[in-house]
Structures are given as structure tokens and as C-alpha cells.
Image (cartoon, rainbow, N blue to C red):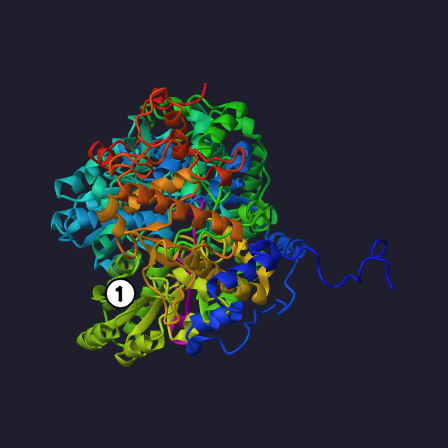
Amino acid sequence: MPNPTTETPPVDTRSPLDTFPRRHHGQTDADLRAMLDTVGVDSIEALIDQTLPPDIRLDGPMQLAGLDDTQPLGESAALAKVKAYADANRPMTPMIGMGYHGTITPPVILRNVLENPNWYTPYTPYQAEIAQGRLEALLNFQTMVSDLVGLPLAGASLLDEATAAAEAMAMCFNVARQKKAKFFVAEDCHPQTIAVVRTRAGGLGIEVVVGRAEGWLSRGFEQEDVCGALLQYPATDGCIHDYAALTAKAHEHGALVVAATDLLACCLITPPGEWGADIAVGSAQRFGVPMGYGGPHAAFLATQEKYARKMPGRLIGVSKDVHGNLALRMAIQTREQHIKRDKATSNICTAQALLANIAGFYAVYHGPGGLKAIAQRVQRLAALAAAGLRRLDYAPEHDQFFDTLIVPLPDREEALTVLGTAENKGINFRDYGDHRIGISFDETTTERDVVAALYAVVEGDRGIDFDLSELADEARSDIPNRTSDFLTHPVFNRYHTEHEMLRYLQRLVARDYGLAHGMIPLGSCTMKLNAAVEMIPVTWDGFADLHPYCPPQQAQGYAKLFDDLESWLATITGFAAVSLQPNAGSQGEYAGLMAIRAYHDAQGDTQRTKCLIPTSAHGTNPASAVIAGMSVVPVACADNGDIDLDDLRVKAAQCGDQLAALMITYPSTHGVFEDAIREACDVVHQHGGQVYMDGANMNAQVGLTSPGKIGADVCHLNLHKTFCIPHGGGGPGMGPIGVAAHLAPYLPTDPVRDAAAQGGYAVSAAPYGSPSILPISWMYIALMGPVGLTEATKRAILNANYMAARLRGHYDILYTGTSGGVAHEFILDVRPFEAAAGVTVDDFAKRLMDYGFHAPTMSWPVSGTLMIEPTESESKAELDRFCDAMISIRGEIAHIESGEWTPQDNPLKGAPHTAEHVTADDWPHAYPRKLAAYPMAEQTLPGAKFWPAVGRIDNPYGDRHLVCTCPPMEAFTEPT
């Protein structure tokens, strides 16, 4: 008999000790037992049985290719496997250009922003009082873009340069009140941009004309049916054109001019706003954000102030709080899709906030002098290369260039030889598909790279008999020199030492609330754990340093990772094929609807353009339908929140052979597994339509059911929700789509290599969207395995039902399933308190900040309510802390109802309470200071109090006094 004090039980040495599911799931066995008792069920299986309709349950356990059904990979094994994928990629010296460039991320930004959970785990800054750090960083980004391109108003980032150009085209169309349906695109724009613009134009009914810009000086605009023109500056071949005359001609005929430009080039050349461009778009990638085989990168759009309400995406503005202090917020949101729905200017939801922050900090760290020095060095290297090529009788085509040369060779055969020689030397040139090659230079280029590039061009012909130093007098480029100043604000001129930059970053991040502080219980947004082990591969060179249009043989590791993910996601969704191209959830919606359109068109059903959408749908659904060229037909919801099947039948019949699709979310946006979901799908199919499922709520499906099992034809997946890519303060995201077999031929195509194929279309600038963050989801799935993924779904449903059970009686749960339970989220009805105590849903949101929480989703899908989703990773203690806070707030409302506090002066109306306010000499409120700051002192850990940076913000003031660039530095109150 073993001695328990000296012997240990046998250990299974075949199993890893660093398994991940026990780290991901937030509850102990004892927690589970207590939670099940509170819910009133014997087991989690019993809860799932009574929650999900039996006809949609999977027939058996989920099987994922290459993953053990019972034993997932341990953390070290998963890292080793994905490291092998990274090592199978071969990053080269990137000289392809096309809007993607090598860059150096300053280590102080890499470590303290990109790799810092305090920056990558927060949500979109809708709750501005606890997002002031991110908002200031985004305001820096806006100011940087505005200054560099010479236009007064810039947004807080878009998805990529190509989609930014497509958004600009839509802006031009809308400014022209959709009466001018022709848009000119210069043929020397980046090819991926032309492809994405063509796709977007098709849905909007815009005719795209691609041609030589010079030809439009004497014709084209005079037809009076052109809403705008897109010009690349510098062009994709590197040439810098003078567009002043063309712009003047466009303006004479009421057309706008869009300049797709390069921020680094704008440090040296005349910015677009100074030669008359109305809109400037582009990518901020080369400002410290790795290429990552295509993304994620922050794109930008800047314009004139008079077009502010036509702008897509987010706009950060300056306002003030209740105490009169400067405060930042997201401005004029009434133009966005979540308000305007099918009348919105854009369907953008996820942006690239984290990457915009990095690009903005890159400008802060280098300052105007540092950026200009980088630009001058890049331009000088290009000029040296051009001089060397001229000496070698390979003169570049253009004399005006910034960083890119186009080199004509005698024939196609020699071009291929040069491309191969360069690759053997570890260099990628651009292949134009004919007798020309492109050579681009960037921040990472060295003189040695220039010499290697010259040798690659002439090797096999002759050697080089000169040094670069001999070319100094010949190295020239006649560029239109910038004369105006930029980045004069103090923020860009103060933090140039690492010490100062580090402290600035820390001051900002201290003003933000993220998952590192506590639960973010947002319904539909699924703020899941972003585990450190999942994040580690993102910055590895093998994933970060590849150009998206490098030869495919250099990206074999990515190919393996894509194969795994496509296979796993196809199994999880129950579909035949997956596209990884959409780089946001809204892009996934758009791509899915474009696949449906392409399918109908291929069947000869071009008249099928009507899309049925429940009134409860997220605002991106109707907005996406419109930009995909469909008209929206609303479908009513029944009193219990389910889709109204009778109304669905009527609307489907009315649409008849014009019915294209139904867009539906499952579980419903009301947090319920609707029993009649399969019947709803059948109704649409009977009328020849397709069923699009919004994947926002996939965290309640994985391993238990699937869109394919339910009857959908296409579904997008928010990898930044269900599959653990961080929200990043508003982005990045990924929105791949899964489709049934009959839709597989109509998935998005490569925007450069395949988009010109018959029926091909592209929705993102890079073939795989934002590949460098896909290792996060790969790691999550590999670490969890099929059993762990299924268990995660079950625990997400249990957590929501536990919270609903605890809060029931204090609040009404607005919608429940037939068994009385909820799915993975639920809606609290707080509307009665407005009449009883003058308390609104906004007051709940602000008061929760004092308790140390981010608010749940507000006023959606039902105005005046709170939608709560806890995810599976939150512990019982954290769930209880939130429930206790909500119960305590209900007690505070009771004090208002009893007359102890007035509806005007109470902790909810005074919230959030800042440290400065509660420690002021004069306390103007009837309730105690301690109650304001520490409403549940016994639950506040020593030193763990999260203080809102500002008091309640005056939103209307910010919209009435729109300021969207950095105010004077003295306006900020910073510690000395």
C-alpha cells in the first residue's frame, strides 16, 4: 500500500500537463455544481437538452481533421507546431511595393502596445469615459493623417487601402445624391484597389471606367455623369503625376477627386489636399505595422469638413465632460450603420483601431523630423538605384518617383530571369506580367540591398564596376517638393526618447478599461479570453514579414495554416467550403451576400435582389445588403422576440421570384434558440431564396449545432468573437465565410491574380484578408480540440443562464426560450425605471463604471434595454461580482423611488465619479462620497479600483462643435 506522504499516484506520461481548456474555462467543478443548482438543473447536459431544439442538434461529436478527439495539444506542442508553419515561410527583402512595405516597429511600441493586453483587449470606445487613452491615440492618428495629406478631417481608420478607396467612391456617389453613376479609376492605381472598387461598384450600380488619367483632361468629365475620379499618388508604378489640371477639370463639372496616397511620400511631396483632392485614402501600414502577408493594417480616409456626415467609419471628436474638462468621444454616430441601417453611408463596424494606434504612435515617436528623415533616406536609396540602373543601360521609365522604379527589360524571358535571380538573392521584385519589373524601397532597405538589386538585374550579362558612392551627383528625382509644415502639435514633438514615450503610453493605457481589468459583458460581441499563448505567434518574423503578393512558394507555412483553418471552420459550420478573405465581420456579411448574388446571376435569376431581414437584426445586416446591391424587406418579430413566421411567409410570397436571401442571426439577437428556425429556412428555400446566417452568436453553436445543420446556405464567422482574436479597442477583426457546396464556386477570388476571371470578385485588398492574426484562431482551436470547443459552448450557455437566474426577480428577463431559459446571452429590461425613477439605460452604463465594469450592450436589439453575454471564460466569482453590482444598483433605484434621493441628484445620475471629483473640497451631492466611489467596498480589492478618466461626457456638445484633430496640448490634464 503506497505511503501518501512519500509516494504519488501514477502519472500518465502520454498526456501533456500544459493542456489549455482548464485554463480557458472559468469555473471549477464546485462552481459548476453551485451554478447548476441556482439554474435548477441536474447537469449541464440537461440544461443544453432543454435549451436547444432537438431537431438542430448535431448527430454526434464534432471531428476536426488532425486534432485528437479526446486529447488536445498542450500549449508547448501547439506553439511548436505553429512555429514549424512560421519557419516554412520564407520572408525576403520586400521590393514589390503595391502599397505594402517593410517597416520597423519601434520596440517600445511593439512591447507596450502590440503585445500589451491593456491595449489589445478593450472594446470599441462606445463608453468613452473609460476609453480616453485609446481615444487620444486615435485622435493622434486622425491628426497625423490630416496633416500629412493636407485635408482637415480624417477618420479613425478603415480596413485596407482598397476598401477605403471603395468607400470613397461611395462617398462621391452619395455627395452627388446618387444621380451621377459613373466613377473614373486611373489605370495606374494598385491592381488590388481596382478589383475591390469594381466589386463595390457592381452592388451600388456604379459604372467604373478604367483608363489613362491624362485622357480625361479633354473628355470624360464633360459628360456630366461622373461623380468622381480615383488617382494613385504616387502611382503603382512609382510615377508622381501632376494632377492639378485634372482636378480643376473635375471640379468644373461637379466631380470629386480621390487621391490614393502614401503617408511617407507625403512627408516630401506636395500633399493631395494642396493640389485640390477632395478625399485622400491609403494605408498607414508602413508606419510601424508589419506587412503580415496582407494585414491587418489601418487604412485611412480624409476629406473636407463639409463632407463629415458622408464619411464612413469612426470619427473621434473633442467634447467636454460634466465638470467642464476636455473629453474625447466617437462623434456624429447618427451617420453610422447601427443608427441608419439601410440608409447608412457604409456597413463598417470593425475597424483597425489597434493598428491605427500603432501607426499614430509611430508618428509620435519619430516626430515630423524623424518621419522626414526616413522618407528622405528611402527616396535617396531609390534615386541611387535609378542612377545605377541608368549606368547599366536599364534606365527606369520615370524620372519623377518617391520609392518605386519600373524597369523595362528587353523581353518577357529576361524579366523572368531577373525575377528568379533576385529571388535567389533573397529579394522579391514586382512582376508586371510583361517585360517590366518593379523595384520598391522602404525603411528597412540598406545600401547592400540596393547593390544586390542592381546585381540581380545585370547578373549573367555583366558585372557592376562602380560603387554607390560614385552615384551621388547622378542620384536625383524631380519630385514636387512639399513646402508646408506638418505634425506641429506638441504631441508629435515631445516623446522622442524611449523614456518619455514609455511614460506617455503608460499614461494613456491607464485611462482605458479592458479585459485585463474585468468582465466586458457585451451581448452579441462575445468578449472572450485572448490567451497569451494564442497571441505569441503574431509577431514572429515568419508570419509578420511576408508581402501578400510574394511568390506562393515563399508562403508554404501560411498555406498549411490556411488549409487547417478552412477545414476546421468548414466542419464547425457544417459547410463545404470557407473563404478567409473578408477582414471584418461586416466584410463577411458583404462577401456572403455577394456569393448569393453571383449564384443567382449564374442561374439566370438576375432579378433576385430582395433581402428579407428581421427588424431585430444588427445594423450591419441591412447596410451590407444595400452595398451588395439588394433592397431590404423588413420582417417583423413576434411578441416573444422570435422571427414572425406568418410575416416571413407573407413577405417571401410577396417577393416571389425576386427573393434573393433571408439574413438571420441564430441564436436570435434576443438571446433565444428559436424552435422554428428550420421552418424559417424552408420558407425561404421554397421561394428560391438563400439563407444567410449572421455568425455573431456562433459561440452558442460550436459543437452543438451548426449553420449547415440548421439549414443556412452561408454564414460569416467573427474570428474576433467566437475564435478569440482580440477586439483591439475596435479592431482588428476577421470575418471568414462558410458556404454550402452550391455556393463554393462563388467565393471571393484573389484581387490581383484571379479577380479578372469570369464572375470573380474581391472584397479585401489581400487574398487572405488579415493573415497575421489567423494564428490566434488556429491556436485556439488546436488547443481546445473538438471536446474543449464543445464544452466552451456549453459553459457559455450555463454562465448566461446562471446570471439570468440570479438577476431574475430584481429585473425582468425580456425574452426566454420555451423552457424558460436563455441562450448564451440575455436581455434585461430596465425600461420601467425611467418612469419610476427617471433612470435610463445610459445611467446604468455610467454607474457600472463606478462598480468597475464595462456596460453590457445598450439599447440593442431593443431600445432602452441591456443585453448581457458573459462568455465561458469568466469565473463564478466574476459573474457574481457583476450580478451583485446590478442588484446593488437596483437598490439605489429603490432609494430614488422612495424619495430618499431625487431623480436629479443620485449616484446613477452623477456617474461616473472620477477621483478628482470625489476628493474635491466641495461635495455637491446628497449621497455620500464613499458610496459614489466605492459602492461595494467589500468587493473592491486593495488597489484594484478602476477610476474613470473623465466625468459623464456631453455628447451633443461634441457634435455641435466638431473638432477632430488634436487640441492644444495644454488642454490635456496630465500628471506632472
- Residue 691 in the image: x percent, y percent? 33, 71
Instruction: Give the image location of residue 57, x and y in percent.
Output: 46, 75
Does residue 751 show up magenta in the picture? yes
| Left or right of 358 in this view: 346 | left
Residue beneath disc 1: 614
* Majority secondary structure of magenta residues: loop
Q: Residue 713's spot in the image, x, y percent?
A: 37, 72
Query: Residues in magenta?
Result: 727-754
Residue 49 part of the magenta-drawn span:
no
Q: Which amino acid does label 1 sit on?
A: Pro
**Is residue 759 shown above or below 770?**
below
Q: Is any atom of residue 478 visible in this view?
A: no
- Pick the quarter of the image with the C terminus: top left
Of all residues shown, which one is farthest toward the bottom? 686
Tell which of 71 and 935 is nearer to you: 935
Is the N terminus in the top left, top right, bottom left or bottom right quadrant?
bottom right
Mark 1 element type:
strand
Taking the spot 49% from the left edge, 30% from the top edge, the residue there is: 506
Residue 347 is situated, as x and y percent measured from the top left of the image, at 29, 53
Q: Is residue 23 visible?
A: yes
User: In this rendering, is residue 387 above or below 578?
Assistant: above
Which one is in front, 13 or 686?
13
